[in-house]
């Protein structure tokens, strides 16, 4: 029987340890998470004790924990960063995701280093340099095409990591200075002000308004679900989901979605295998449309795309499901293509604003027709020109199914032995 020669890693984000555990239960082979400091996400840090507990949990499944230490460091932070790296190593962390090359000159333990997307890796030369100086995995820029990824693959020994889902920046990662210029808050220090999600008015050289209060720098979200096989063939081995600010539902849903998509490929490709142990059973149907997104694009992976902007709104408006047909003082009538439930979240666009409501009571009035009594009736609904398009951004019944934890049975791992025997992962005892 032919043995697998390449491991594919599904890499999920975690704002906190509890989300990291759920990511692993829903199929992640690895989780990346912020430590106590120096991670490029303000207010997404975690204590060493939480990271140690998450590492212990992950290693039961042969999964790995990567900690982000990917801000640019000031001189007075070098020694605190070095001490933190030693403590993360003792906590059982498998790798650090870094941007500052000064870390390479530090006296640090033998922990794997991954080059962050903040390193702006777009060329063969940059990738080769990072591979040769010791990075075991590099995160390529989101803007690259399949031929560009393949060219880098052919030139380096390091593993290639690539973002397959989540938010897109309008600038190259690590090269955006809008936030710092406008507010003094640096994205390279983990404190981006999200200037690209703000509304702007565009005028031509005569001062005439071309676009008024549009989100002209806001991009749709990345979605490479239809390009996974091509990315594998181009050399990607770690498939990264963006979202260290995302909530539990998002991480569970998107992780499960890509776990199923990758598993379908693994079924057909005996030379490929999971990077962790066991299999995940899901009790819901994963769907990227059900949790936060701004629309989707596969960006420039296949070819340069024109329709990449989320210019109307950077918010999550959900999916179109029908129309509002009548509005009364305390209720509204709708005609929809989906089954509605008590607790659903709905919204309409009124001029430039997204007006949302929560369905307190939903009453069927015929096929595809419902009367809805919201928790609170938004006054703006009285101004609608009917019929008016209606979106749903929270499916209550689907969310309830999402709350059920999948079972990733540990009995399978007991037959295989500890993670170190199964996948070469070297476990370390945490120093007390």
Image: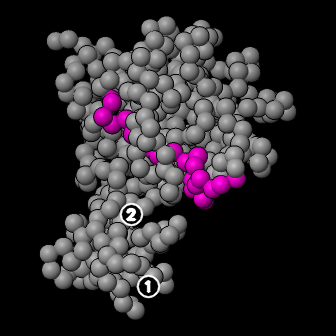
Q: Secondary structure at mark 2?
A: strand
User: Can you name the residue that lies furthest to the left here?
Assistant: 367
Q: Nearer the viewer, mark 2 or mark 1?
A: 1
Q: Answer yes or no: is residue 200 visible.
A: no
Residue 328 falls in which quadrant of the image?
Answer: bottom left
Q: Bin the neighbour count of mark 1 within 10 Å (Cα to Cα): few under 14, some 14-19, many 20 and up.
A: few
Residue, disc 2: 393
Q: Is residue 382 magenta?
A: no
Taking the spot 74% from the left edge, 21% from the top edge, the residue there is: 102
Residue 22 in the image, given as x and y percentages of width and height:
41, 48
Residue, disc 1: 382
Which of 195/203 is in front? 203
Q: Secondary structure at mark 1?
A: helix
Looking at the image, residue 320 lies above or below residue 59: below
Q: Which residues are magenta?
A: 207-228
Taking the spot 20% from the left edge, 81% from the top edge, the residue there is: 364
Lower position in the chain sequence, tag 2 or tag 1: 1
Q: Quadrant of the C terminus?
A: top right
């Amino acid at each position: 029987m032919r043995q697998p020669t390449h491991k594919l890693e599904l890499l999920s984000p975690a704002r906190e340890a509890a989300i990291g555990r759920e990511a692993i239960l829903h199929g992640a082979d690895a989780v990346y998470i912020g430590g106590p400091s120096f991670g490029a996400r303000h207010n997404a840090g975690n204590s060493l004790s939480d990271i140690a507990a998450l590492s212990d949990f992950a290693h039961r499944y042969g999964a790995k924990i990567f900690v982000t230490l990917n801000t640019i460091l000031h001189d007075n932070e070098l020694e605190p960063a070095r001490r933190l790296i030693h403590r993360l190593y003792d906590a059982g962390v498998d790798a650090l995701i870094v941007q500052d090359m000064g870390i390479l000159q530090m006296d640090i333990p033998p922990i794997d280093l991954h080059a962050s997307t903040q390193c702006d890796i777009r060329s063969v030369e940059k990738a080769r340099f990072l591979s040769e100086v010791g990075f075991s995995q590099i995160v390529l820029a989101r803007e690259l095409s399949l031929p560009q990824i393949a060219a880098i693959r052919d030139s380096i020994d390091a593993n290639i990591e690539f973002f397959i889902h989540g938010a897109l920046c309008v600038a190259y990662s690590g090269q955006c200075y809008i936030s710092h210029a406008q507010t003094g808050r640096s994205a390279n220090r983990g404190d981006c002000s999200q200037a690209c999600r703000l509304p702007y008015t565009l005028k031509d050289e005569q001062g005439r308004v071309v676009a008024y209060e549009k989100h002209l720098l806001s991009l749709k979200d990345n979605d490479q679900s239809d390009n996974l096989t091509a990315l594998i063939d181009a050399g990607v081995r770690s498939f990264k989901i963006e979202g260290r600010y995302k909530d539990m539902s998002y991480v569970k849903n998107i992780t499960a979605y890509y776990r199923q998509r990758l598993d379908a490929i693994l079924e057909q490709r005996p030379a490929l295998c999971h990077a962790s142990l066991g299999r995940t059973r899901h009790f819901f149907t994963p769907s990227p449309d059900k949790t936060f997104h701004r629309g989707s694009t596969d960006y420039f992976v296949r070819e340069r795309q024109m329709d990449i902007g989320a210019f109307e709104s950077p918010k999550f408006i959900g999916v179109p499901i029908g129309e509002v047909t009548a509005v009364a003082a305390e209720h509204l009538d709708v005609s929809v293509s989906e089954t509605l439930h008590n607790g659903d979240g709905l919204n309409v666009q009124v001029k430039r604003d997204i007006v949302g409501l929560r369905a307190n009571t939903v009453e069927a009035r015929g096929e595809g027709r419902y009367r809805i009594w919201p928790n609170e009736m938004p006054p703006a609904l009285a101004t609608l020109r009917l019929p008016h398009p209606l979106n749903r951004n929270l499916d209550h019944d689907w969310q309830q199914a999402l709350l059920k934890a999948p079972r990733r049975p540990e009995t399978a791992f007991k037959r295989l032995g500890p993670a170190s025997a199964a996948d070469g992962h070297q476990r370390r005892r945490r120093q007390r």
